[in-house]
Image (cartoon, rainbow, N blue to C red):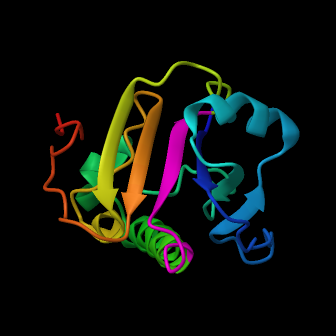
Amino acid sequence: MCFVLYMASNKSRREIEWDSSAPAFHVTSADAEDAHNTRPHFSKPHIYYLGSSSQCGCDFRRDLDWVFEQRDNTEKEKISDNQTRLHTYLRECLTDEDSLELFGCWSGDESKMLQSKRIIHVDDLLNSDFFFDDSKTELITITKEGEHVPPGGRGEAPRP
């Protein structure tokens, strides 16, 4: 089972093709089934699937990675690169929009009820204390302006 991450925007966004010879961050329009299942969580019309170098979202910083410092350097670099590319892409999208929405869950749970919501500044994605909470279905509003959110703020689950 994999963690999956979707983005909703008010505008059509640039897609980044998956390249199996050089696995990295990629963006595709959500397929019809995923768009149908995730649409109730979003207030914005355009839905995209955001993948990492593992093809799914498992190589973004997730709740399971709270022991990130114990990972080997190769894993740390891979996860950090995916997180940085995600941040860069979202920052690019926010040049003509005030906010974006991200929905994360385990694959197959796309139509389940939301269990958590939070609002963060786009730069918080690079904070070493940030992680996607893969223990629940979660909607995150990403803003381009506003205060940075401290760990545990605005609904973020504290680490065990």
Q: Position of residue 108 (x, y in %)?
A: 68, 26
Quarter of the N terminus within the rendering: top right
Residues 118 and 78: in front is 118
What's the residue at 47%, 75% (across, down)?
A: 81
Q: On the picture, is 26 further left or further right than 116?
A: right
Quarter location, residue 83: bottom left
What's the residue at 50%, 51% (across, down)?
A: 101
What's the residue at 36%, 41% (across, down)?
A: 64
Quarter location, residue 11: bottom right
Q: Position of residue 46 (x, y in %)?
A: 71, 53
Region of the chain picked out in magenta, as a range = 93-106
Q: On the picture, is 85 further left or further right than 111?
A: left
Q: Relative to 85, does residue 83 appear above or below in the rendering?
A: above
Q: Relative to 136, does residue 54 appear above or below in the rendering?
A: below
Quarter of the C terminus within the rendering: top left
Q: Residue furthest top?
A: 113
Residues 58 and 139: in front is 139
Q: On the picture, is 119 further left or further right than 147?
A: right
